[in-house]
Image (tube, rainbow, N blue to C red):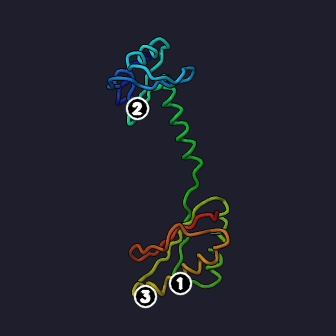
Amino acid sequence: MAKQFRKEKIDSKFKVNDDIRIRGNVRVVGEGINSSVVSIDEAREMAKELSLDLVLINDSQSIPIVKVCNFEKMVYEMKKLEKKNKHNSKPLKEVQLTVNIAKHDLETKVNNARKFIENGNRVKVVLSMKGRELSRREENKKSILEFIVMLEDVAVPESTPRDEGNRTTVILKRKG
């Protein structure tokens, strides 16, 4: 076993080396190792011979799965992948509408939303209402519904428009 790890040092959901409290057989996997079912003591011995760590991957199955690998390298690779995935995700763009929006202003906002959607972003459309506008909520939703209809060639709503206090919101995503 390469090193003893402390829980506070590596924030992980995995159990490593002596932290694995399993009795019976386990399935051993790893690079350069044939997947096989052996006792937990044999798996620990395999890892010790290779100067690597024994990591519990999945204990919810009838035969738990352990991996023989360098734990520090595995955690590093996972963090690197997580950072890459986080970097590649497109942010949610927001477009604000009012109840009495002019036709040209609505078209301008539709064109901006169209650009966002074509770039792969999702668009959150927010219709804000004030004062007496709140008493005619259903009637005032026509501007948000018109917005959705104008973008129906490139986008579809993820759900129906939702009321949230003095706002009505809907999220649009790329069609297809």
- Residue sitting nearer the eye, 165 or 55: 55
Q: For mark 1, give the secondary structure.
A: helix
Residues marked 3 and 1 touching at CB (< 8 Å): no
User: Which residue: 56% across, 23% down?
Assistant: 31
Q: Quadrant of residue 103?
A: bottom right
Tag 3 secondary structure: helix
Residue at 65 percent of width and 78 percent of height: 107
Earlier sequence position, callout 3 versus callout 1: 3
Question: Relative to residue 15, is residue 103 depicted above or below?
Answer: below
Q: Position of residue 173 (x, y in %)?
A: 58, 64
Q: Which residue is mark 3?
A: 136
Q: How many marks?
A: 3
The residue that label 1 is drawn on is 142
Q: Can residue 74 be seen in the rendering of this structure?
A: yes
Q: Farthest top residue?
A: 49
133 is higher (above) or lower (below) than 164: below
As drawn, the label of residue 151 is none
The image quadrant where one finds the N terminus is top left
Residue type highlighted by circle 3: Arg
Mark 1 neighbour density, 10 Å: few (under 14) some (14–19) many (20 or more): few
- Type of amino acid under label 1: Lys
* Side of 104 where 27 appears, left or right: left
Circle 2 residue: 14
Residue name at image x 54 percent, y 36 percent: 80
Between circles 3 and 2, the one closer to the viewer is 2
Distance between the Cα atoms at labels 3 and 2? 54 Å
Q: Position of residue 161 (x, y in %)?
A: 48, 74
How dense is the environment of label 2, judged by Cα within 10 Å: few (below 14), some, or many (20 and up)?
some
Mark 3 nearby-residue class (10 Å; few <14, some 14–19, many ≥20): few
85 left or right of 62? right
- Residue 102 on image: x %, y %: 60, 85
